[in-house]
Image (tube, coloured by chain):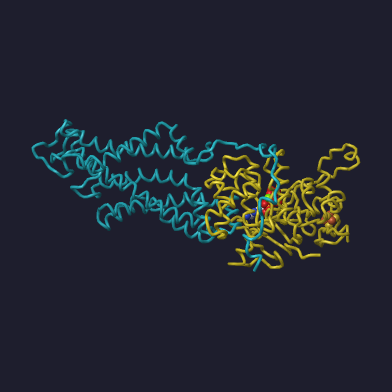
Amino acid sequence: MEENKVSDITLSPELFEKLDDSEKNAEKIAYESSTYLQDAWKRFKQNKLALIGLIFLLIMLVLSIIVPIISPYTYDGQDLTLQHAGSSLQHLMGTDKFGRDMLVRIMCGGRISLAVGFAAAAISLVVGVVYGAISGYLGGKVDMVMMRIVDAMYSIPDMLYVIMVVVAMGANFVSIMIGVCLTFWMDMARQVRTQVMTLKEQEFSLAAFVLGAGKSRILFKHLIINSMGPIIVTVTMIVPRAIFYEAFLSFLGIGIAAPQASWGTLANDAKGLVSTYPMEVIWPVLAICLTMLSLNFIGDGLGDALDPKKK
Amino acid sequence: MSNPILKVTDLKVHFPVAGGVFSKKQVVKAVDGLNFEIMPGETFGLVGESGCGKSTTGRAIVKIYNPTEGKVEFDGEDITKIKGKELSQFRKNVQMIFQDPYASLNPRMTVGEIIREPMDIHNIYSTKKERENRVRELLEIVGLKPDHIRRYPHEFSGGQRQRIGIARTLALNPKFIVCDEPISALDVSIQAQVINLLENIQKKMDISYLFIAHDLSMVKHISDRIGVMYLGNMVEIGEADDVYNTPLHPYTQALLSAVPIPDPKVARQKKRIVLEGELPSPIDPPSGCVFRTRCPNATERCAKEKPKAVKVGNRSVACFLYE
Ligand SMILES: Nc1ncnc2c1ncn2[C@@H]1O[C@H](COP(=O)(O)OP(=O)(O)OP(=O)(O)O)[C@@H](O)[C@H]1O
Ligand code: SF4
Ligand SMILES: [Mg+2]
């Protein structure tokens, strides 16, 4: 059919007369050009605590990757002639009860702790965003059922999940991560659902619908993209909590198995020595605290920076 | 006479509202039995107070809402249940311009992406280059600079954003556009420019508009015919000048008497009719004529029967006074 070919209809610039200049200049570009992310970064940098947190986290990441590689010691290399050594040039953080280098052990622990944190956040991100977005977008009965499931799961204490999964699957990296994710994805799902429910009523989503956009296009190109701020903030809040859960489990003795060690295990190993060799407890605890603190600062900073209302 | 491009028959749109646990389910009768037609190339103005169901009518026409009852025909075809290819064709033909230029553009997309989206959705043009050229062309048509293509909506003023929204709807070469208060969020100085742009486009592309507004004097300027709505019902339809100069329905008369008149001589002659009482809730509209609770001419009959639209000349009025 002739009229079905929209592109054939001739709507060319010649049909239109040019606006005269007075009309064109009546409205000037109102704001400086800058993308959303540039803006956000500018605002993030102004928050000094968040910036310090980010720098600390990056240093921690780099050190935990590099130190075990370049150090002459390994995390399980024992030196029984050098037990409980204090800080020295050979061992910057001293050694533990088997004469193992603490610095290398802390950094190897950092690898595990940070990996648990980021992996848990990544899984919660994917599962939570998909679940929450579908629930919020479809609404109605689907939403009700999906949210009642979350409510039911939410009513069980977090730690119970983690301990159940770890006990059932054995204590290892994967089981701890699954246990942690079982509770965290729900925070993400709820957050995303709320966002999507308000965004889908906004005129730009309606406009996309009227233009003929399909469900997945509206969901990804319009709704989820515009929920990015709260999503990122939720992610940065999940990482420290996951690190803490892992440390807590390890501290209880049901975490990562020896001779591998996360920060929690290291603290657990040394907890009997608080009065005699306090530094062996202080180092891993300091690592946990500072990392969690940094992540919380980053989360706060991002929350402000990514909020489009704060111009 | 040619056939109408849009024909709305007995359109009803009711929204369920969550009542309390023990109360029975209630509905908001946002639109409750509308009839009107729009001719090709015509601008039909739809006016009425806030909450009378103008937006709901427009949104039912572009299929954001499904009608509870009634029919909407576009080009002779009932579009309330179309799917697939027919729906996609309908989307190309019928578009909407929204009220709030700050909310109607996705803040995370560049102007280029926004205007290109309809072409991406409907696979118009095979190459990206062609689409991009078309975007530049559309920007020029709506009076923006083609090199604005990589900028984000927040960099523009309200009027410019509304132009971007207009360019987006034009990308599909629609035959019919629902304009839902497209200028009410803009500065007065900019309103006229956007109206001129819309009129220009209409002339060049032969588009029909359903133009929604709550200000009768503004609608009169742009519309060929006007429909006046009250509480989900159409109370009067007629030629723009006729409705404005000699309103027939008591509600239209009241609406117009509230308009300030620049000429004091005329103003003194015209008596002001003040609407008494509250606007009733669309959840529980009055029986019979919906306007009867505020109508100075209401009789007993008005509470019992619902007045049907009657022809008075080339006007249509839903009031017993004209039977
Ligand atoms: N999605 C919805 N769910 C429930 N009620 C709705 C919905 N949309 C509109 N309504 C109700 O329907 C009635 C008509 O609303 P509508 O937005 O069509 O009015 P309007 O004439 O466009 O008003 P305005 O001039 O303020 O835009 C109002 O009472 C409103 O509260
Ligand atoms: S039908 Fe009766 S109440 Fe309704 S507008 Fe006419 S006179 Fe007034
Ligand atoms: Mg409205």
Quarter of the view holding residue B37 = bottom right
| B149 or B243: nearer the viewer | B149
Quarter of the picture holding the N terminus of chain B: bottom right
A84 over B195 or under it: above or below: above
B38 left or right, relative to B264 = left
- Left or right: residue A135 compared with residue A119: right
Give the residue displayed 64% in from the left and 69% down from the top.
Answer: A1
Residue B24 appears in the figure = no
- Chain seen in cyan: A
- Where is residue B232, by image quadrant? bottom right
Q: Residue A72 or B167: which is nearer the viewer?
A: B167
Q: Position of residue A303 (x, y in %)?
A: 46, 40
Give coordinates of residue A134: x percent, y percent.
49, 57
Residue A8's place in the image compared with A68, above or below, is: below
Say which quarter of the image contains residue B315.
bottom right
Q: The chain coloured yellow carries which letter?
A: B
